[in-house]
């Protein structure tokens, strides 16, 4: 089965239990929202989408949990930009208070920073 057909056949299981077609465009949309005005090149965003799509298509045959897709996107964003990563996980992990978001940001700041990037705090 060719790649486009596999992607169309793959379904995403949402938190609510509903299922919908796997749509790489939604991954890019989420990344773009998290990036906002951060200096993350479009080519890096597209590359991340391609890596996530390729990994999901290789590992899952018919269904994938939306949380699994989100986890893979978050891992990729962590490598690209710490601020974008925290923005993304604030939605992906459903942080509802500023303290929860601050805890997530602190946890990220305590990780080793990529070369050339300063700490969040």
Image (cartoon, helix red, strand yellow):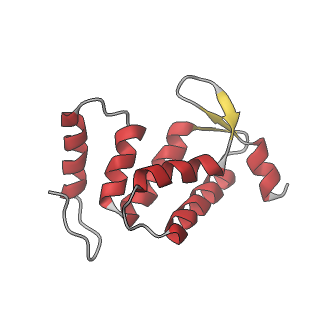
Q: Is residue 12 left or right of residue 34?
A: right
Could you tell me which residue is drawn at 39 percent across and 47 percent down? 88
Front position in the image: 64 or 28: 28
Front position in the image: 11 or 96: 96
The outermost residue toward the right is 1
Quarter of the rendering occupied by the N terminus: bottom right
Could you tell me which residue is drawn at 55 percent across and 23 percent down? 16
Residue 72 visible (yes or no):
no
Could you tell me which residue is drawn at 49 percent across and 45 percent down? 70
Could you tell me which residue is drawn at 78 percent across and 42 percent down? 9
Q: Position of residue 93 (x, y in %)?
A: 38, 37
Residue 77 visible (yes or no):
yes
Q: Position of residue 69 (x, y in %)?
A: 54, 45
Quarter of the rendering occupied by the C terminus: bottom left
Relative to 98, say whether 34 is above or below. Answer: below
Q: Position of residue 17 (x, y in %)?
A: 59, 23
Total marks placed: 0
The outermost residue toward the left is 121
Relative to 24, say whether 113 is above or below. Answer: below
Among the 4 quarters of the image, the one containing residue 10: top right
Relative to 35, say whether 8 is above or below. Answer: above
The outermost residue toward the bottom is 116
Q: Is residue 86 left or right of residue 16?
A: left
């Amino acid at each position: 089965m060719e790649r486009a057909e596999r992607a169309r056949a793959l379904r995403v299981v949402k938190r609510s239990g509903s299922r919908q077609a796997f749509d790489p465009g939604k991954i890019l949309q989420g990344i773009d929202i998290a990036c906002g005005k951060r200096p993350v090149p479009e080519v890096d965003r597209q590359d991340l989408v391609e890596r996530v799509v390729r990994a999901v298509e290789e590992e899952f045959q018919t269904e994938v949990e939306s949380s699994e897709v989100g986890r893979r996107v978050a891992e990729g964003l962590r490598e690209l930009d710490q601020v974008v990563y925290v923005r993304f996980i604030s939605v992906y992990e459903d942080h509802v208070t500023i303290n929860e978001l601050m805890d997530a940001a602190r946890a990220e700041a305590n990780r080793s920073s990529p070369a050339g990037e300063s700490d969040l705090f």
